[in-house]
Amino acid sequence: MACEQLTRLGDVIELEDVKREPISSRDRKDRKGSYPYYGAQGIVDYLDDYTYEGDYLLVAEDGENLRSRKNPIANAASGKFRVNNHAHVIAESEKCNLVFLRHLLNMTDISAYVTGSTQPKLSQSNLCAMKLPLPSMAEQNAIANVLSLFDRKIELNNQLNDYLLDLLKSSAKNLYLKHEKNIQEKLPSGWRWVSIGEIADMVCRGIAPKYSLESDEIILGQTCIRNNLVLTENGRLHAPKKLTDKWLRKYDLLINSTGVGSLGRTAQVWFEPSKLVVDSHVTIVRATDKKNALYLGSWAFEHERYIESLHTGSTGQTELPRDRVKAIRVVLPDAGTLDEFNAIAEPSVKMIVANQEENKRLIEIRDTLLPKLMSGEIDVSKVDLMQLTNNHLADY
C-alpha cells in the first residue's frame, strides 16, 4: 500500500546523542581494546570500554558524504560500542523499524535539511524535522524482513571475504616469518632476498589528472587504498592517452605514497580492469612474473607500517619516493613453495571478487525493490521470500 502521509521523524524516533563522546586520536592510543568506536561513516577505532549496548542506527551528522552520497549516510550498529560526535544515534522505537528507516534514509534526498557549504552538517533539529513517508509498523516490519534477507547475504559475503583475506595473509606470513627477522640467516635452498625493483618491471606513480585532454578514463584516487577492498570508481577525469602503460592490470600492487595517516596503505587489483588508472598519490608496482604477484601483495598487506616508515619529509609533507619503494627487500620463496601458496591464494582471490560482484548486484536489486514496496507497486504481503531471487536469500 502506498504511503501518502508524511511523518515528522522526531515524533517516531528515540535519539540518544547524549552518550556520544569525542575522543582524540592521541587519547585513543592509551585506550585500545575490542569495542568499536564509530564515526560518521563507520568504525574509526577500537577502545577498551563502551557507552552503548544493543541495536542502533547511526546517521552522519557532518561530512562531505552528506552531499555527495557516495556512501550510505545511515548505518546499523549493534552490540557494545562507542560513538563520537559526528554521528547521530537512534535507538529502537515502537513507532519506527530501524532496518526500514536505514534503507529509507539512504534512498531519500535530504539536501533540504543539510546546512553548510564547506562542511555539510545535518543538525539534530534538522534530523528530527525531516518529513518522511512512514507506513504502519506492520508494513515497515514486513518490508524490513524482505530487505534484511539481502542485508544478511551481503554481510555473509563480507564475512567470508574477511576469512579468505586472513587465509591469504596467514599463508604468506607462514612463509616469510621464519626467515625475515634475521636478514643474515641462511635461507632454504631456492629462497632468496630480493628488492622490489628486482622482481617488478614497473614501479611508478600514477598520473596527474588533466582536464583538457580528450580521453575520458577512470581515475582512482588515494582514498581508494584499502587492503581488503576491491577498488571502486572515484570519479571520471581526463587521462592522457600516451600514458596507457599506466592503466592498471590484474595483480598490480598499489601503495599510497603521499600524505599523513594513509601513507603506506596498500591494495591490489584482483580483477581484470578496463582502462583504469590511479592518480599521482599512488605508486604502481607490477611484478615481472605473475607467480610472485599475490605473494608480494600479501607481504605488503602485512608490512604497511614498515613501508610507511620509509617516507621522507616532515610531518604534513611526507612522501614515499619511488626509489625507496624499489629498494624494499622481500624474502622470496622457491618456485615450488610459491606454487603451493598460489594454489591457495588464486582461488581465494577469485572468490573474494565473485562475492563482491554478487554484493553489487544484491544492492542494486534491494535498492530498486524498496521504492516499489513503498509505493505499493509491489504488495509486500504477497512477496514470497522463498522465491524472491535466485540467490537463495531465504536460506540466510
Image (cartoon, grey):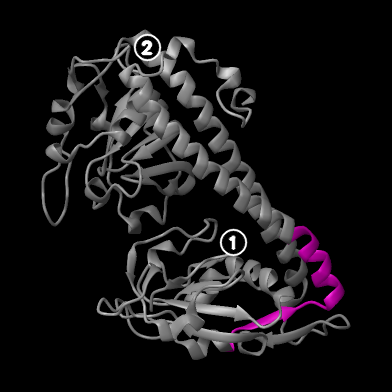
Mark 1 residue crowding within 10 angstroms, few (<14) / some (14–19) / many (20+):
some
Kind of residue at disc 1: Phe
Find disc 2 in the rendering and name its residue. Answer: 139
Residue drawn at (76%, 76%), measured in percent from left and top?
179
Q: Secondary structure at mark 2?
A: helix
Disc on the earlier residue, 1 or 2: 2
In the displayed structure, would residue 392 be above or below residue 240? above
In this orientation, which residue lies closer to the viewer: 39 or 336?
336
- Whether 109 is among the magenta residues is no
Measure the C-alpha gap from mark 1 to mark 2: 41 Å
Q: Position of residue 380 (x, y in %)?
A: 43, 14
* Most common SS among magenta residues: helix
Q: Position of residue 291 (x, y in %)?
A: 74, 74
Find disc 1 in the rendering and name its residue. Answer: 271
Residue 197 seen in the current view: yes
Kind of residue at disc 2: Glu
The residue segment tinted magenta is 327-345
In the displayed structure, would residue 62 be above or below residue 139? below
Number of numbered discs on residues = 2
